[in-house]
Image: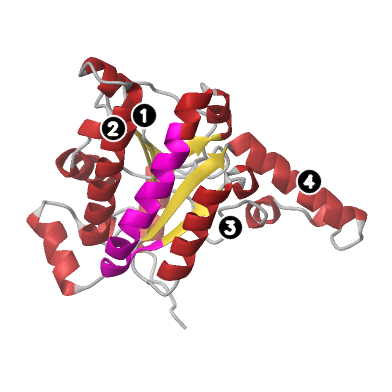
Amino acid sequence: MTDSTRQYCIDHDIDPARLPRHVAIIMDGNGRWALSHDMPRHRGHVEGVNTVRRITEESSRLGIEYLTLYTFSTENWNRPVEEVDALMELISIAIERETPDLIKNNVRLTMIGDIDRLPAEPRRRLEGCFAATAHCDGLTLCLALSYSARWEITRAARRIAEMAAKGEIDPASITDATVADNLTTAAMPDPDLLIRTGGDCRVSNYLLWQIAYSELSFTDTFWPDYSPDEYRGALRRFGGSERRYGMTSQQIQQLDNTPHDDR
């Protein structure tokens, strides 16, 4: 973390040492925001893209390492064709429009999900942005597109079963780490904090394996209205939480007070 990033955190009353490495967000409420403003639903998705830009920029300024956004689920393919087509077009336009700013802010774009289901044009633009930002080593922005946790876990189970059938792995040796290594998020740490906007208190088939010990934050605010101020509030609350991972507070304190050998 740079001195300027650390100072930015301090200026906003955030402890830099207690920031989450990885924040995952369920961006809910675009359609309801539009309806509440007497607008067609697609206008909410357009405004939602602007919020993505604001929260991505804020994450970068704060020194967050990974930001994963639930952009389009496998279940979303069941929405009305007109809405799906509009979303795919919006994704295509937004990716191309935002690529220069991602590069300027040193943000690398990646994706988790079934990319083969995406129409040709969004896929082409996505892959172009992946390549254009591959050299960036600041924030990693990961879009969960055509994604669901059950799809991902089933895919991982199938891959592990195929390896076992070929004799490449002993079934008795399969561990949690084996499963994690075959998930689409294998290159990232698990989310420390999951935020959901829009008022619902559920995780909607999102990163079910990875959020086993994530802190959860729910807000009634619709995604288009979700501000950097409210985001920082969620980060402050995260900084004040004690993550015990099944242990007691006393055990955590003992671990924190144990000298570490860095050799």
Between the residue at mark 2 and the residue at mark 1, the CA separation in whole angstroms equals 6 Å
Visible residue check, residue 29? no
Left or right: where does residue 23 sit relative to residue 152? left
Between the residue at mark 2 and the residue at mark 4, the CA separation in whole angstroms equals 35 Å
Q: What amino acid type is highlighted by mark number 1?
A: Asp
Q: Which residue is mark 1?
A: 28
The N terminus, quarter of image: bottom left
Q: Residues within 10 Å of mark 1 (few under 14, many from 20)?
A: many
For marks 2 and 3 on the same chain, the one whose residue lies earlier in the sequence: 3
Question: Image quadrant of residue 199?
Answer: top left
Q: Nearer the viewer, residue 59 or 237?
A: 59
Name above or below for residue 79 compared with residue 193: above
The residue under the point 51% across, 21% down is 80
For marks 2 and 1 on the same chain, the one whose residue lies earlier in the sequence: 1
Q: Magenta part of the protein: which range?
A: 86-108
The residue under the point 42% across, 59% down is 109
Q: What amino acid type is highlighted by mark number 4?
A: Arg
Name above or below for residue 151 compared with residue 203: below
Q: What amino acid type is highlighted by mark number 2?
A: Trp
Residue 186, disc = 3
Residue 223, disc = 2
Magenta span has 79? Answer: no
Between the residue at mark 4 and the residue at mark 1, the CA separation in whole angstroms equals 31 Å
Q: Which residue is mark 4?
A: 158
Magenta span has 100? Answer: yes
Name above or below for residue 146 compared with residue 197: below
**Does the CB distance between marks 2 and 3 fall below 8 Å?**
no
